[in-house]
Amino acid sequence: MVSRRWTQRLLPLLLVSSPIVAQQTAAGDFAACEPLPALAGQPGASDDAAEQAFCDIDYQGGSVALCPKTWSTSPAALVYDLEGTRWQGRAEAFEREVCPRGGSARDEAARELGFFKNSLNGRETSGTFAPASLLYYHFSRLLQTRVQVPVAVRQSFSVAEYRQRVVARGVDYSSGGRAKMLHAGWLEMDRALAAPAQYSHRRELFDDTGTRLLGALLLADGKRYGAEVNGTRASGWGEGQNRDFQRSAPFLALRTDAPLAEAIAQGIAEARADPAMARALPADISAAQVAWWMRDITEVVLLDYILGQQDRVGNVDYLWRWVWQEEGELRTARSEPAGPAQKLRITVLNDNDAGARASYANYARSTGMLDGWHHIDAGLYRRLQDLGADFRQGGPVAQAVRQNYRLSEREAQRIIDRGMAAADALRKRCRDGALRFDLGLADVLNPGAARAQPVDCGAAPDSRPIAREDSP
């Protein structure tokens, strides 16, 4: 079973062997799990236990069920634990009798163990790219984000058995309903798995033998934000809603050149000029909540800019948590603690699989989300500069991007170029005196007492040109 508490760790710039042993895939194995090579973390908590829990799932023991997703727009499989239920030892019956119920199938299971998503990019399907989920997981740890990103491992299944056990049912259960794009996705999956060697995007779906379906296994948690963070989306899909996203109170505050508390007040007032935003933003919204969101937005935008996200707006989630500072460290709890604490919504990025692929639009870049910032956390700034330096020098992180995620050379190079560009852009704002380093933990929890830190902006990098990225 997988813990829903995702721990944070830093991935430094030295590649080491993973302490987790990946399942060995022998002929006839239905499932195999592969945590990607780990980058050693700083002392403290790690995600190794969560990765290992994914790899310990027994798909053939009779008490783990795989249900095809029958809602939304893209094919996936839900992994359910049946231990202690009337379906224990009867996974085949559960898959036959309960999976057709869709999302309510989880009510009959003991718990959800994971969510398997493979790449799929057909002409009539929605776009998903499984390596993006793995990249977001690792880069969020590298940048030490407070935004939560779920642990993810590479998971593979036997093509023939997955087609029979999951895909055939997905085709059946999605037919005849309103989910036409989802049904088209399951049909595309069936065609691909029927003839892997002939499939046009086989590098994305299959291993080199064409006998195993590749994807990412993760576990999501959280509820969807409304317009207060996701924006009104009034301008429609694409660049329009991504510009709407930048009209939220925290985004407007981020671009306000004033002390933190004043920037927050101005951001709230400006956002509420839009009636839809005024309805979405609670009347009693605290300055600490908006400051927390400001920090979250800097992290979300940096991840999306570097990793080339096409579908962020409308896919930002949250969890309620009690938050406080103890000996300079962040502490969170589901229940109210004995000491002073604030109840805040903390941001979760569950849906990250529309990133990194060369054909996807990068709306964080094309709509200028990185422009005009006046506030950032000093630690986040320094870690971004370290990443940019590694990328510029072709260091271990750059090598991992090229080697570990089954990316094309173009896809890997774009990530590296965008990482350098993001670091350069914020360094320039720092050198121009435009950045206030006032989104540290103490500042966010008490914006009225925020004090900007002095930060060394860093030397200008060598003049190695960054390749221009054309729109897909």
Image (cartoon, grey):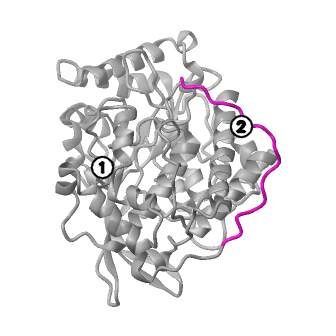
The amino acid beneath tag 1 is: Leu
Question: Quadrant location of residue 40?
Answer: bottom right
The vertical placement of 266 against 171, above or below, is below
Residue 336 placement (x, y as % from top left): 29, 81
Query: Mark 1 — residue?
Result: 82
The amino acid beneath tag 2 is: Arg
Tell whether position 275 is magenta.
Answer: no
Residue 420 placement (x, y as % from top left): 69, 46
Query: Mark 2 — residue?
Result: 402
Residue 209 placement (x, y as % from top left): 63, 21
Q: CA distance from mark 2 to mark 1?
A: 39 Å
Label 1 secondary element: loop
Q: Is residue 84 visible?
A: yes
Q: Are marks 2 and 1 in contact (CB under 8 Å)?
A: no
Magenta residues span: 455-472
Number of other residues with Cα within 10 Å of mark 1, as a class: few under 14, some 14 to 19, many 20 or more: many
Question: Of helix, strand and loop, which mostly describes the magenta segment?
Answer: loop
The vertical placement of 197 against 38, above or below, is above
